Image (cartoon, rainbow, N blue to C red):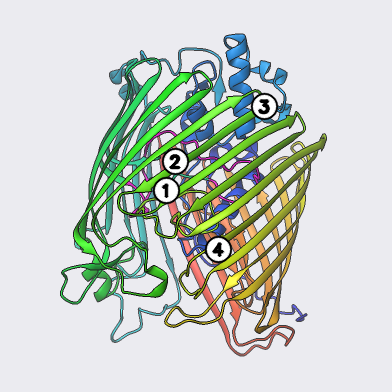
Amino acid sequence: MRQLASPDFLLLLRAAALLLVTCGSLYGQVETEQLIEDVVAQEAEDGGEFTFNAAFAVLEGYRERPLDLNLATAEELAATYLLSPVQIDRFLAYRELMGGLISIYELQSIPGIDLETIRRVLPFMTVNKGLDDVNVSLARMLAESDRELYLRASRRLETARGYETPDPAYAGNPWRTYVKYRQRYGNQLSMGLVAEKDPGESPRYGFDYYGAHLFLRNLGRRVRAVALGDFAVSFGQGLILYTGFGFGKSSLTTSVARNAPTLQPYASVNEFSFMRGAGVTLNLSDQIEATVFGSRRRRTANLTADSASITSLGLSGYHRTVNERADRNAIVQTSYGGSIAWRPLPRLRIGINFLGEHLNKPLQPRPQPYNLYYFRGTDLHNLSLDYRYRYHNFSFFGEVAGAMGAGKAMLHGINLGLDRRADVALVYRRYDRDYQALSAQPFGETGGGRNEEGVYLGLELRPADRWRVNAYYDLWRHGWLRFNIDGPSAGREYRMRLTYAVKRKLDAYLEVRGETKGTGGDGSHLDPVVDRTRFQARLHAGYRFAAGWEWRSRLDFGYTDRETEKRQRGIMLYQDIHYRPLGPFSFSARVAIFDTDGYDVRFYQYENGLTYNAFVTPYYHAGARSYLLLRYKGIRKLTLEARVAQTRNFDGRTFGSGWEATGKTSRTEVGTQVIWRW
């Protein structure tokens, strides 16, 4: 190993994220941050964005006006992410048997719901009917709603690639700016505006992206939800449409089913994963619920030379260079559809879902063997049937979907509560190579819901107080070529974590995970498929040693083997200190050192950052990293935040070669944010 002799550890890479500031200590800060790491790391593996939408922001509304457990639906409970699927099933069975709860502490009588879970949900749930009553008028919601305004700015201090003078590639300055206004009454009313400019962009009207939304829930007994402007839509298990948040493979090993409300408000700055138009959900009867929506929005897309068609839809959201600006809003995507949910029995739900997509210019991917079965044209229609059924300790879920003139996809799963100390999840999925859907987000190894068949087994054990074991094993295969993989391939993955926790004092876990799957060439010609094996081990501990003070330490070790290459190794160590007292001032700081042979041995780490600027970044190559986050709430209704971060990399090193001073590079970023709540 290298001698870690450089003391020049200053402050880190990119303004990151504190997603659950308002509920961190109650929900379990380490557990929440690990979930964010898991989900974003999986998106990154699939070629997605590192940024993370505020999937847990729903809890802020319930903090002010708690969710009534006697009225809550399975979808509303699932959207809080405070209860596992098995716990939700057991709760619904108990409520059905008893006819409702008298006190929230009745949850102790339900197998699998322990005191720690009850403490976690206490700030957000109640059994006092009325706060979420459907009779609350719109005028009252508008008058009594909570308001918040966010103003954020951040930038890299060094001159980055693309900004070099005299002929910079980027048209704009390196500042990232963000403004958001939001007004809400619990989770019954949400309205707001959001605007953002990315670094390097030079928009005509101040910001490159604008969004607005108005969302109302429970307007009388027939109107379940109304969405205007930007909103999210989720059908079934995500085989045809899912623009909300859904778990993949994570440390919550039995939380694999999609169970989000059909319509949800959207207030993020992800520029493609949402709908823009109108939607409504109606209770047609006690057993039937119907949702319809329509959306029309401009999309960034890669235009062909004659501008008559597009080769792909843009996903980055950047419009900095001449080519990126030419592709901005290049096409109009019209989406429309609906869902009918039928509950013939209290424990059974059956849904029929339809989605239509229209592009005003044809999509014509550049011909490659791997994309032979991709969608081409202007119009695509999808139809699916999904189901959920509870029977004693069993909970069945699934969806079967098809695309007109193309293939089919299916997913079936079961959650089983063996007893109060053991839960099991089993999922089988099969997505045909010619299945086509533009907005699919189902459970799986890769995104898009195509060309995959697999079986997943997840397990959670609670053998004793303070101890928990989470494990999964996933086995899959791809019957056709994929991007950069020039032949059929297969893979397997396992993960096991042993957690020991002492309430409000200690959180510690030991984790091992490994994966073996096929990799290939550059996609331009047929190269042999070779297996790549990754192994990583982690030891993490967080200790609260005084009121408001917490120390965290983490050690990661890993290696990557490829049949045609030498083994690559890596190691990472960080030390965190967090000060979160009851007073107005708080801070978080980190010092990290890492030493890996390259990107194939990378460690994804969550970093505390400006509120709702969630980010998980990979540590790789050799370097040192640190950051300091300051937060002040001493001014009435205001929260002031500042963050400075730096990464120092030592380029050109090989594993074990030492830390020479030559080739060093640094990246320093600063950011500040003002939050006004009233």
Q: Earlier in the sequence, mark 4 or mark 1?
A: 4
Choose between 394 and 568: the one closer to the eye. Answer: 394
> Is disc 3 placed on a helix, strand or loop?
loop
Residue 72 percent location from the top left of the image = 50, 22
Residue 638's disc is: 2
Evaluate if marks 1 and 3 touch, with contact meaning CB atoms under 8 Å apart. no
Mark 4 and mark 1: span between their CA atoms?
24 Å
The amino acid pointed to by label 2 is Leu
> Which amino acid type is shown beneath numbered disc 3?
Asn
How far across and how far down the image is residue 471, in percent? 72, 49
State which quadrant residue 291 falls in: top left
Circles 3 and 4, Cβ within 8 Å, touching? The answer is no
Q: Residues within 10 Å of mark 3 (few under 14, many from 20)?
A: some
Q: Secondary structure at mark 1?
A: strand
Q: Which residue is mark 1?
A: 674
Left-right relation of 28 to 326: right
The residue sitting at 54% across, 19% down in the picture is: 69
Percent position of residue 610, x then y: 49, 52
Mark 3 vs mark 2, foreground winner is: 3
**Residue located beneath label 3 in the image:** 393
Q: Give the magenta range.
A: 247-274
Whether tag 4 and tag 1 are in contact, CB under 8 A, the answer is: no
Question: Which numbered marker is on residue 617?
Answer: 4
